[in-house]
Amino acid sequence: MAQVNLTLNQEEILLLLSSGNSSEAFKTLLTKSLNQFLAAESASQLGAEPYERTEERQDQRNGSRERPLTTRIGTLVLSVPRHRKQPFHTMLFENYQRSEAALIATMAEMVIEGVSTRKVAKVMEELCGKEFSKSAVSEACKKLDPEVESFRNRPIEPGRYPFLMVDATYFKTREDHKTVSKAFMVAVGITGIGEREIIGFDVYDDESNATWSSFLQSLKLRGLSDVLMYTSDAHPSIRYAMGNEFPGAVWQRCQFHFIRNILDAAPKNYKAGLEEEIREMFKCETIAEARKRRDEIIRDYSDVAEKSMEILDNGFEDSMTIMSLPAEMRRPFRTSNLVERLNRELKRRSDVIKIFPNAASIIRLMGSVTIDYNEVLSRKKKLFYSTSLPKISQETRLRFISLAREQYKRAQAA
C-alpha cells in the first residue's frame, strides 16, 4: 500500500473554515486529501515520483481524468491519474462501488422507515450532492422484492402451527386512474411451544368469501395444516373461509373486538360502566362463573341497552372458547391484539406514503415492514411452555371439532 503524506496549507485551511460554509470547506479539504492519496498510489505503481528518473520506473504518466465520488458530506470530483501502459488501479473506487450499493439500500430502507420517496430524493441530494429522481428511488425499492417474495412464499412445516390469528387492514392505492382501498391480509401462526411467527400476507381487492378463501388456500398449499384454534374478529368471510379450508379449527372471537361491538350499540351514558362489567366477566376463572356474570349483566342492562345485550348474548360462547384450554394458554388467544399491533405498525409506516402507486408497492414496502416485525417477534418471550399443549385432552379436541362445525353453519347463514 502506498505511503501517503498529506500536505495541506494552513492559511488555506483557515480561510476555508472561516468562509461560513463548513460543508463546502470539508468537501474541499477532503478532495485535496484524496487527490494526494491517488497521486501517492500512482507513484507507487509507477515506481517513481513526477519527473523522477529511476531504474525502478514501470510506466509513464498520461495526464488525469475527473471522476465523482459520493460521500456523506457530498459528491467530490477527484482527479484520477492515467498511465500509458497499464491502467491505474485504486482501492478507493473499489470501495466506491460498494458505497453505491449501500446508498441504494439506504434509500430503500428510508422508505420502509416511513419517509416518502419525494423526501428521500431530497435528503439524498442534500447528503450526497447528487440528484435522485422519484423513479430512481422506486427502482431502488424494487431491490427488496426477492427477499419479500422469498419470505411470504416460504414452505410451512405441516402441523407446526396449531393456533392461528388472522386479520386485514386497508391501504389506499392507485388503480386505473382512481384511488381505491386494498385489503392487506395477515396470518400469524403460534407454535406448540408458544413461538409467534408471521406465516403469510397478501393484498386483495376486498374481504369477501372468495378472497379470504384464496388467502387461506395459499397457506394450505405452502403446508399449513392441523389448525386447532384461530382468533379473529367476527368478519363473516373469515369464519366462512376458515370453515371451508380448516373445518376442524374452532373459532375464538376476539374479545377486544367483541367488547367494541357491544359498546358501539350501547347508549353513551352507559358505555363506561358496561365496559368495566364485561371486562370483569372475561376475567372469570371458569366458564360457569362467566355465564353467571353474563346473565347478571344482561338482566341489569336489558332495559337501557337492548341491542348491546343481544350482541352479548349471541356472541358470548364464541368469545369464551379459550376457557376449554389450560389456564396458562387462555390469555394469549383471547384477542387478536398480536395482529392488531402489527397493523398499527404498518399504518404508522404508510401514513407518510398516503396513497401507494400500485398494489405491488404495498406488498414490497408493507411486506418488508412485516419481515422486520417478524424478527422482533422471534426475540420475544414464548407465550406458553412446551408442557401446555399436551394438556389439551383428546376429548377437548373432539369437542372443538364439533363446535367448529356449528360455527361454520352459522357463518354460512350470516
Image (spheres, grey):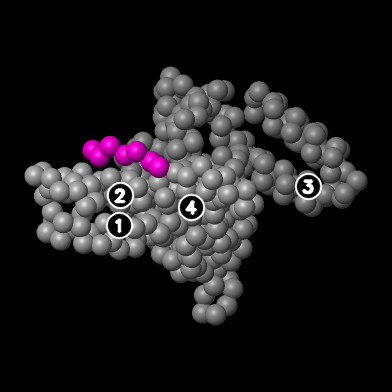
Q: Which residue is label 4 attached to?
A: 28
Residue located 47% across and 48% down the image: 29
Assess whether mark 1 and mark 2 are in contact (beta carbons under 8 angstroms): yes
The disc, 2 or 3, on the residue closer to the chain's N-terminal end is 2
Residue 212 visible? The answer is no
Distance from disc 2 to disc 3, alpha carbons, whole Å, reads: 72 Å
* Camera-side residue of 344 and 143: 143
Q: Which residue is label 1 attached to?
A: 80
Distance from disc 1 to disc 4, alpha carbons, whole Å, reads: 16 Å
The residue segment tinted magenta is: 1-7
- Nearer the observer: mark 4 or 3; the answer is 4
Distance from disc 3 to disc 1, alpha carbons, whole Å, reads: 72 Å
- The three-letter code of the residue at mark 3 reads Leu
Q: Quadrant of the C terminus?
A: bottom right
The disc, 1 or 4, on the residue closer to the chain's N-terminal end is 4
Q: Which SS does the magenta portion mostly show?
A: loop
Q: Secondary structure at mark 2?
A: helix
Q: Which residue is label 3 attached to?
A: 263
Residue located 77% across and 51% down the image: 264
- The three-letter code of the residue at mark 4 reads Thr
The disc, 3 or 1, on the residue closer to the chain's N-terminal end is 1
Q: Secondary structure at mark 1?
A: strand
Tag of residue 38? 2
Assess whether mark 3 and mark 2 are in contact (beta carbons under 8 angstroms): no
- Nearer the observer: mark 3 or 1; the answer is 1
